[in-house]
Image (tube, coloured by chain):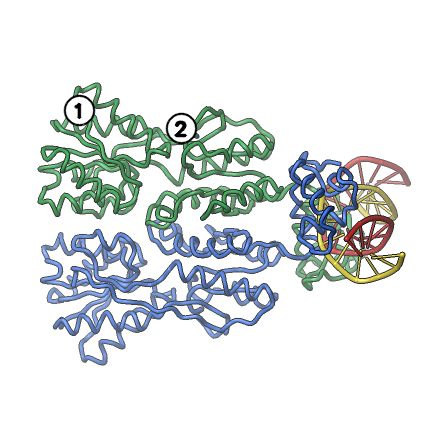
Chain colours: A green, B blue, C red, D yellow
Amino acid sequence: MTAAGGRPTLEAVARRAGVSRATVSRVVNGSPKVAEEIQVRVRQVVEEMGYVPNQAARTLVTQRTDSIALVLTEQANRVFSDDQYFPGIIFGVSQVLEDADKQLVLLMAHSDAGHERIERYATGGHVDGVLIASMHGADPLPATLARRRIPVICGGRPLGRTNLPYVDVDQAGGVATAIEHLLAGGRRRIATIAGPQDMVAGIERLAAYRNALRDSDRRSIVAVGDFTRGSGAVAMRQLLADDPQLDAVFVASDLMAHGALRTLREAGRRVPEDVAVIGFDDVEMAQFTDPPLTTVRQPIVEMGRRMAEQVLRLAAGEQVDHSVVLATELVLRDST
Amino acid sequence: MTAAGGRPTLEAVARRAGVSRATVSRVVNGSPKVAEEIQVRVRQVVEEMGYVPNQAARTLVTQRTDSIALVLTEQANRVFSDDQYFPGIIFGVSQVLEDADKQLVLLMAHSDAGHERIERYATGGHVDGVLIASMHGADPLPATLARRRIPVICGGRPLGRTNLPYVDVDQAGGVATAIEHLLAGGRRRIATIAGPQDMVAGIERLAAYRNALRDSDRRSIVAVGDFTRGSGAVAMRQLLADDPQLDAVFVASDLMAHGALRTLREAGRRVPEDVAVIGFDDVEMAQFTDPPLTTVRQPIVEMGRRMAEQVLRLAAGEQVDHSVVLATELVLRDST
DNA sequence: CTGAAAGCGCTTACAG
DNA sequence: CTGAAAGCGCTTACAG
């Protein structure tokens, strides 16, 4: 007995080993109540024949797929700028899933049809749980999945009223520390380059900047980018036009900060003498900009790990905390 | 009739629509020989009940999984440096698979056990084909899979003697153009920072550098990195110690070139006046370094796309070209 | 054009 | 401890 692909089946192994399919199944799945001697014989035949269980057949009966989907609904410019966010999340998630012997299915939506396709796939019983890495606006996808009883964990606090479980970093705390540092350094006109205002990270970092300045009586000077270098360069030009006297800028991502540094250089402003710059992320690149970048570190890989751990708990039927919030930290370098 | 997950089955739809399971199956799968009227009714019931076919059951009978695996066997430092290589490959692959309605399963090996796990998974009938994004040394995995009749496409020419199909860029041509440009600019002592010598991209770019210099009678000056910024910074220090008079350096990746630029700045060397620098990749960052980086552009996303197209052909039983080689191009900026 | 039936390769109560 | 048997939810010749 050989499956269509030419691969041996349980049946074939059982026949060769002189036992029943049930017994082979038990040995393969590590059930303890099989006689030692039989276990040895079966394992040997499995090895000889190169038997590997057919996952589809197994899933059909167990109702478990042993895979987790990671959804990335993001425009191309960000997924494929050299932003470390997505690779970091993927890396963290895959570490945890590998240890748990689960598979990672990557679901990217490049188009609107893609969005619908993802919903269909995730509700189609293909996966035991879903991770949503980043959302624009109040994406209905996580709520839809949750309603269908599919375990879901969001990366970043979901917008809108919902009580979906999520993992996030302490955005407000990180920004507050950054602004305090600038104020303590005597900076008087502190601008910001915000992230996109349909994403929670963009919204919260801007709100935190405003709060911190309000407390200190400074006025806020704002330009908005989309987390890419190019948008940071453009936003910096706008800020310089708005307020040529500005002496500091908090930038909501390191990539945008890199773009801002180029604009400042072109405009003849020295960093940090004329303008102090603080980024957000602490990607490897931040150590190599000119000057090296002071920035708020967020633990991206750890965020991926925690997301994966949470969804595995849900898939196992356990309860999880409604939110997990990871600490951020100001890393001082030469741009302030 | 409702499946364990609470989802409706074919059976349930058939009953509600007053037809057989076979008929519902035909409608769902778009078979043309079903009466128009019945099609309409079945589709309506499918909609009402939110029926989605169970993939495991379908796979079990069709022997197709509609998924493709992408294997990333790489150390953490590279996957999680902000190298655009892996995200670019993932992005290109996922575009093509999305259009073909196939799923992308990401297989990363973080450990040795991971390597074996990947082999087990790929041979376990979970996927219709396998893409291997990057290999160290003469990895036996692709050949093992090919022997098992599993469609495989390699990213980059595989090392060792094998005739596995692959997609690659014109490494030699790109490097040759870069060196010619340096020679034409009157540079006399041209060093290189090579990539890791157990990877084909590292090996081929170094070999092409040596060939180009041999033709011009210059001596070669070599340091080796691992494609990360940090390794580029260290390698540049070694080169300056080896030959303080060097006036150009070809760096096998943009990230390493970024590291090299920082070392040159620290050493008081002006770029390009004292030392010309050329990178390889053309990531977004290359436009933002100080000075902006001249580099050899390789079409990474396109490479991912072509890999996916090739593996889909193999999975469909078609023949594919033994190799697809994409053009590279020298992009001139201010570092030369 | 439509339906009854076989079968894909497993797991798991249920007996013994 | 072991085996016979049912059943997971589909697709697809085969008849009609």
Q: Residue at x 58, y 29 (%)?
A: A318
**Quadrant position of the N terminus of chain B in the picture:** top right
Q: Is residue A233 above or below residue B112?
A: above
**Quadrant position of the C terminus of chain B in the picture:** bottom left
Name the subunit of mark 2: A
Q: Residue at x 75, y 38 (%)?
A: B12
Q: Which residue is mark 1?
A: A219
Q: Which mark is residue A325?
A: 2
Q: Is residue A41 visible?
A: no
In x, y percent, where is residue B290?
17, 52
In x, y percent, where is residue B265?
13, 53
How many marks can you see? 2
Q: Amino acid at mark 2?
A: Val
Q: Amino acid at mark 1?
A: Arg
Q: Nearer the viewer, residue A331 or A243?
A: A243
B155 with respect to B150 (left or right): left
